[in-house]
Image (cartoon, rainbow, N blue to C red):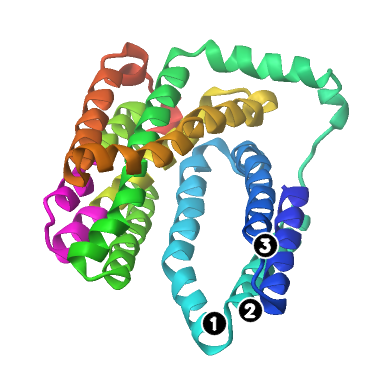
Amino acid sequence: MLLADSLRTLAEMGLGIWVLLGPPPLWGFLALAAVMGIGEAFFNPAMTGIVPQLLEPEMLQQGNALNGMSNSSGAVIGPAIAGVIVAVVSPGWAIIADAATYFVSVMSLALIRIDWNPSEHSDAFVELLREGWREFWSRTWLWVIVIQSALVNALFASLFVLGPVVAKESLGGATSWGAILAAEGVGALLGGIVMLRVHPRRPLFVATLSSLIYPVPLFFIAARSSVVVIALSGFVVGVFIAVFNVQWTTTLQREIPEDVLSRVSAYDWIGSLAVLPLGMAFAGPVASSIGISTTLVGCGVLIFVLTLLTLLVPSVVQLVPPPAQHG
């Protein structure tokens, strides 16, 4: 995590300075975005794995909820601060300010003290990958939900590709779209607050049920509903996205042995995001062929069907946490 955020600090700082010196070419943006992606790919699975080393088992859900709330708060406040910096100074300084946030993360991570013995992971890299895969594939509930998440993420990508187009054509442009996204962030913040107190007896069942709400904004945008209605639907979806994320991450940390948790989480991230680029790439061409509204409705219906199919898997519905960890 230290190395990942050090890498992201350098990438953002480099981009910010480049922007100040003059408009970078497209390849410069692409290259530094790829570096940022590499940092994120290492950071997120490690984050999943480090939380159980810092918190007692009964505090895992609260810790994950607080982590999600910090992300949601940043998603709401960050763009506003960036907008002010861009308006008052320049985009380059806004990017440098973002680099500073990664540096703060590096300094904060450096203060964490955990017991870790590198000799425990002295096996060959490929063998470590195989061990993580065996743990991943041995749990039906795990790979079923990862496959569902991969397809849902690809379908939900239509919102981020086609939503701005609809906002520009029918909803008043970027300001309206920004309000819709901000409402989702506020909803996610509220969902995190709820998860501080509510401990479902069947966490994966509740998490999967939450996915049934995801298509709602797609339907309202397809219908060209008012900005208020779409923003409210985004708010509700934000709440349930937070519910899913907290329950899913906490379940992984409770059910997967600590020594392979980050590797299993890495397979989770790979699987969940594997077809997201395809979803983004095909949303535009499909909408050009059958229409934006039809594409959005079709994606929403497929998300709904995939979620219902996932609820037919017994281990998804029946898995419960250890007795001391549910209320």
Q: Which quadrant holds residue 282?
A: top left
Q: What residue span does the magenta drawing correspond to?
A: 213-235
Q: Which residue is mark 1?
A: 85
Q: Is residue 214 visible?
A: no
Q: Quadrant of the C terminus?
A: top left
Whole-angstrom CA distance, mark 3 to mark 1, is 17 Å
Q: Dot 2, crowdedness within 10 Å: few (<14), some or many (≥20)?
A: some
Whole-angstrom CA distance, mark 1 to mark 2, is 7 Å
Dot 2: what SS?
A: helix
Dot 1: what SS?
A: helix
Taking depth in this image into account, of 169 and 52 the one nearest to the observer is 169
Q: Which residue is mark 3?
A: 102
At label 2, which amino acid type do we have?
Trp
Q: Earlier in the sequence, mark 3 or mark 2?
A: 2
Q: Is residue 292 magenta?
A: no
Q: Which residue is mark 2?
A: 93
Residue visible at 63% across and 78% down in the picture? 93
At label 1, which amino acid type do we have?
Ile
At label 3, which amino acid type do we have?
Tyr
The secondary structure making up most of the magenta span is helix
Q: Earlier in the sequence, mark 1 or mark 2?
A: 1
Q: Is residue 215 magenta?
A: yes
